[in-house]
Image (cartoon, rainbow, N blue to C red):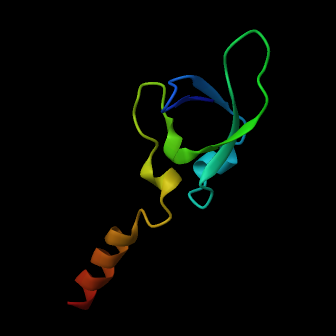
């Protein structure tokens, strides 16, 4: 899978998709994808990454509390 580095707009090959999908992991291992030779793996913060289209990563990949509001509404709605 490839993503775009926000600051440089270069492509990054994601080498750790589990880390990408896990909101408990704030970074991933990947490598810049340019030139003829494979670049050395590096750690990238998810906040520095975008989809190739320029869209942000889904909140469920970056925020462990992405459903807190929904859960709060559900339980407080039943209690009322």
Residue at the image point whose x is 52% and y is 41% from the top: 48
Q: Could you tell me residue 32's position as x and y percent?
A: 67, 26
Q: Could you tell me residue 19's position as x and y percent?
A: 66, 50
Judged left or right of residue 53, residue 43 is: right
Taking depth in this image into account, of 52 and 60 the one nearest to the observer is: 52
- Farthest residue, direction left: 80
For the image, the number of numbered tags is: 0
* Rendered view: 44 above or below 52: below
User: The C terminus lies in which quarter of the figure?
Assistant: bottom left
Residue at the image point whose x is 61% and y is 55% from the top: 22
Taking depth in this image into account, of 16 and 12 the one nearest to the observer is: 12
User: The N terminus lies in which quarter of the figure?
Assistant: top right
- Farthest residue, direction top: 36
Report which quarter residue 3 is drawn in.
top right
Residue at the image point whose x is 48% and y is 25% from the top: 52
Residue at the image point whose x is 68% and y is 48% from the top: 18
Q: Could you tell me residue 33's position as x and y percent?
A: 67, 20
Judged left or right of residue 51, residue 22 is: right
- Farthest residue, direction front: 7
Q: Could you tell me residue 64's position as x and y percent?
A: 50, 64
């Amino acid at each position: 899978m490839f993503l775009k580095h926000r600051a440089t707009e270069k492509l990054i090959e994601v080498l750790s998709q589990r880390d990408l999908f896990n909101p408990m992991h704030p970074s991933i291992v990947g490598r810049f994808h340019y030139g003829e030779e494979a670049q050395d793996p590096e750690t990238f913060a998810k906040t520095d990454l975008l989809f190739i289209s320029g869209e942000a990563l889904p909140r469920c990949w970056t925020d462990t509390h992405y459903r807190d509001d929904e859960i709060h509404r559900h339980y407080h709605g039943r209690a009322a």
